[in-house]
């Protein structure tokens, strides 16, 4: 029997059908309904519910998943190799593109590593701006999780609402950094530029908007029976499983362990801020929903506290051997050197020109050694292993990306469940393939 | 900017570049996961320090300097991290300068009879401790670190490779594996480092102790060509399955690679080649 949409071939394991689109009537009419054939389903890498280019190979028995394999690497861009050929400051522009939903975290964790190697601390204002930008970024990332996760489960209003709310976060980023994503805003020694006029008011407005949007999540989803039933008791993993598989972040907290690097291994002075680490004890997709939404409320609280503490001051370290020589200014085409600086180096000071040239083309030197720094990204522990050979370029930078590590849980979450629940489970991991494949 | 001129492309690559050659040359290794690991391997081999700050060849065609402008002409002195002396410190220290690094090392010394053989150097730098471990003792040491009630390094945060390439010394232990272990109980972090040479790039797999190392070891194999003995399925993970060479080695250039996967087919993951 031949079917136009189901070509077959004979193998050592029996006849294998390759089902593609279309109608498989010819095939199905001839299948013995009591047979125990297995169905191997290839999901992705181009599939709307696999968060970019993730490929799942599922072995099915009826609708139950009996085996699940994850194939990654489709978005490997060689970021770690590339930064070895750029100077220490340029590397930020590469690393920010790894996990493209949590740019500020990628930039900050790397810069913390470089600063630890240099043995410098950033000015207080730069530190507070970093914290604020990271927390705004946590919200924008969680909004995308809610939007895509909702879309995959059929809650399309969750998607439109989520992306609308995320747009508000991106507006703040655009005002401050000039870009909506891939900012390269956090630099070794501080941040690229100070907050522009009107930024504080804009963020206060944003805080109000976020609180409204978060109430909207509760009104739309929290009591919604379909949403509850799609998530509760789906994709369970406990604390032991999480630790064995290296899973951190909302998955670990949803399993019941209040492990948040902002509290357990504070960096940038997070211990000054009042916020809770939300946990839940069910360890299923529902818990992860509850924990993430609660985390968003806490992030708003942190941003509010940062605004109250912001004092005028420098945003870049006062060390001309490290700090970018020019004040950057935001023009209509993005960030650039300020006009006064260009006039100074081109017209009046040869020494400034030489200094600018050396620092911009060659970069600064970092004493040899290696460090590991970690921050709590929206997806868990984001680590940076930074090695210097004493030169002007990183000798090696490895990002320990939580998406990469957490995706190892797919088999544990989905085997034994239904195919439809696999979608919910993968969405609850919130993988970002840019970070996973780097 | 044209491609590199000095680096051979994979077709005429040296033996160490070929994955299958390594797999063939390597002696058969028994699984170390479910039986007593080779803790008491008699010949403790010599591990040699590898130096930093060496020549590199890449797409900029620069040699002898980290300076991409070509104007600096600076040569770095090879740099080897110095062994630390007591007290090691770490975290909050007491009046003698002792911190949790001392506690960890003391506890390890008590709990692990082979500690002196297992760890050949302790480095404390920038508030982080690195234990340089002989690979024969890695599993034994990691098991103690994970299981001992006074240590409890439950989480393997990160595992990755670094290539300390030295073109003047072929036999150097240039490939390093760095294990970043976290104790959630005591909120401590330490780093283990194992170094091997390109000719014999075998390291025992820690997947039996830390299942999270599964993908991370696959990535380290993929990028550096370090073979983790006892890994359940050591296949490429980020690069295409039929890729030649190990991209993050320092003698592998950034650009100028011909498209290798043109016309190739990639088998499903369960049918891929396994390198043991």
Image: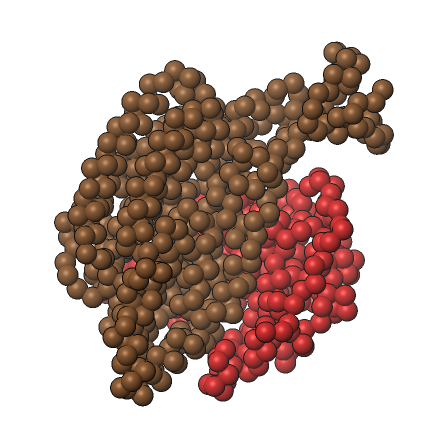
Chain colours: A brown, B red
Asked if residue A149 lies left or right of residue A332, the reply is right
Tell me if residue A189 comes above or below residue B241 in the rendering. Answer: below
Residue that sits furthest to the front in the current view: A332
Residue at figure coordinates x 75%, y 11% from the top left: A34
Query: Is residue B177 visible from the viewing direction of this image?
Result: no
- Residue A416: x and y in percent read 58, 23
- Residue B200: x and y in percent read 69, 64
- Camera-nearest residue between A366 and B229: A366
- Residue A334: x and y in percent read 35, 60
- Camera-nearest residue between A156 and B61: A156
- Camera-nearest residue between A55 and B273: A55
Tell me if residue A133 comes above or below residue A118 in the rendering. Answer: above
Q: Quadrant of residue A61?
A: top right
Quarter of the image that includes the N terminus of chain A: top right
Tell me if residue B19 comes above or below residue A31 in the rendering. Answer: below
- Residue A51: x and y in percent read 51, 38
């Amino acid at each position: 029997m031949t079917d136009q949409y189901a070509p077959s071939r004979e193998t050592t394991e029996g006849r294998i059908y390759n089902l593609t689109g279309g109608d498989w009537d010819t095939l199905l009419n001839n299948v013995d309904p009591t047979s125990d054939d297995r169905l191997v389903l290839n999901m992705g890498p181009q599939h709307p519910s696999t968060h970019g280019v993730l490929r799942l190979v599922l072995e099915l028995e009826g609708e139950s998943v009996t085996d699940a394999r994850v194939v990654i690497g489709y978005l490997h861009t060689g970021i770690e190799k590339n930064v070895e050929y750029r100077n220490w400051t340029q590397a930020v522009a590469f690393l920010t593109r790894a996990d493209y939903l949590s740019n500020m975290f990628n930039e900050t964790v790397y810069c913390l590593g470089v600063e630890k190697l240099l043995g410098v601390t950033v000015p207080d204002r730069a530190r507070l701006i970093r914290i604020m930008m990271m927390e705004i970024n946590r919200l924008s990332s969680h909004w995308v999780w809610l939007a895509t996760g909702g879309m995959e489960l059929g809650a399309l209003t969750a998607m439109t609402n989520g992306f609308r709310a995320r747009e508000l976060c991106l507006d703040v980023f655009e005002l401050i950094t000039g870009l909506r994503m891939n900012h390269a805003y956090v630099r070794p020694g501080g941040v690229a530029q100070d907050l522009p006029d009107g930024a504080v008011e804009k963020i206060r407005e944003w805080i109000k908007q976020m609180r409204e949007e978060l109430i909207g999540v509760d009104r739309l989803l929290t009591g919604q029976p379909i949403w509850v039933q799609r998530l509760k008791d789906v994709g369970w993993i406990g604390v032991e499983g999480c630790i064995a598989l290296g899973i951190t972040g909302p998955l670990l907290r949803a399993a019941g362990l209040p492990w948040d690097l902002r509290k357990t291994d504070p960096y940038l002075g997070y211990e000054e801020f009042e916020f809770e680490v939300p946990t839940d004890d069910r360890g299923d997709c529902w818990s992860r929903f509850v924990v993430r939404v609660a985390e968003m409320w806490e992030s708003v609280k942190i941003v509010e506290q940062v605004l109250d503490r912001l004092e005028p001051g420098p945003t870049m370290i006062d060390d001309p051997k490290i700090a970018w020589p020019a004040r950057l200014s935001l023009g209509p085409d993005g960030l650039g050197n300020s006009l006064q600086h260009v006039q100074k180096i081109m017209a009046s000071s040869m020494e400034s020109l030489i200094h600018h040239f050396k620092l911009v083309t060659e970069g600064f030197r970092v004493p040899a050694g290696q460090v590991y720094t970690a921050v709590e990204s929206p997806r868990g522990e984001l680590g940076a292993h930074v090695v210097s050979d004493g030169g002007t370029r990183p000798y090696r930078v490895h990002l320990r990306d939580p998406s990469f590590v957490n995706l190892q849980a797919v088999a544990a979450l989905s085997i034994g469940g239904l195919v439809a629940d696999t979608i919910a489970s993968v969405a609850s991991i919130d993988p970002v393939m840019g970070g996973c494949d780097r | 900017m044209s491609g590199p001129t000095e680096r051979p492309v994979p077709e005429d690559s040296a033996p160490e570049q070929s994955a299958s050659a390594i797999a063939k040359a390597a002696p058969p290794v028994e699984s170390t996961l479910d039986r007593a690991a080779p803790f008491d391997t008699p010949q403790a081999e010599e591990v040699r320090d590898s130096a930093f700050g060496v020549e590199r060849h890449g797409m900029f065609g620069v040699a002898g300097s980290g300076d991409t402008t070509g104007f600096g002409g600076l040569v770095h002195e090879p740099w080897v991290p110095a062994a630390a002396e007591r007290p090691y410190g770490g975290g909050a220290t007491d009046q003698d300068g002792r911190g949790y690094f001392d506690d960890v090392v003391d506890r390890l010394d008590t709990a692990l009879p082979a500690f002196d053989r297992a760890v050949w150097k302790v480095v404390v730098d920038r508030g982080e401790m690195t234990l340089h471990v002989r690979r024969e003792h890695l599993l034994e040491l990691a098991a103690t670190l994970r299981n001992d009630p006074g240590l409890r390094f439950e989480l393997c945060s990160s595992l990755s490779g670094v290539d300390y390439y030295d073109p003047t010394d072929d036999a150097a232990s240039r490939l390093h594996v760095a294990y970043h272990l976290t104790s959630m109980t005591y909120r401590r972090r330490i780093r283990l480092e194992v170094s091997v040479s390109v000719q014999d790039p075998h390291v025992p797999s820690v997947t039996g102790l830390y299942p999270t190392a599964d993908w991370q070891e696959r990535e380290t194999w993929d990028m550096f060509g370090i073979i983790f003995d006892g890994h359940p399925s050591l296949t490429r993970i980020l690069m295409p399955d039929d890729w030649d060479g190990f991209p993050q080695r320092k003698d592998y250039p950034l650009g100028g690679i011909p498209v290798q996967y043109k016309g190739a087919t990639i088998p499903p993951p369960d049918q891929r080649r396994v390198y043991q």
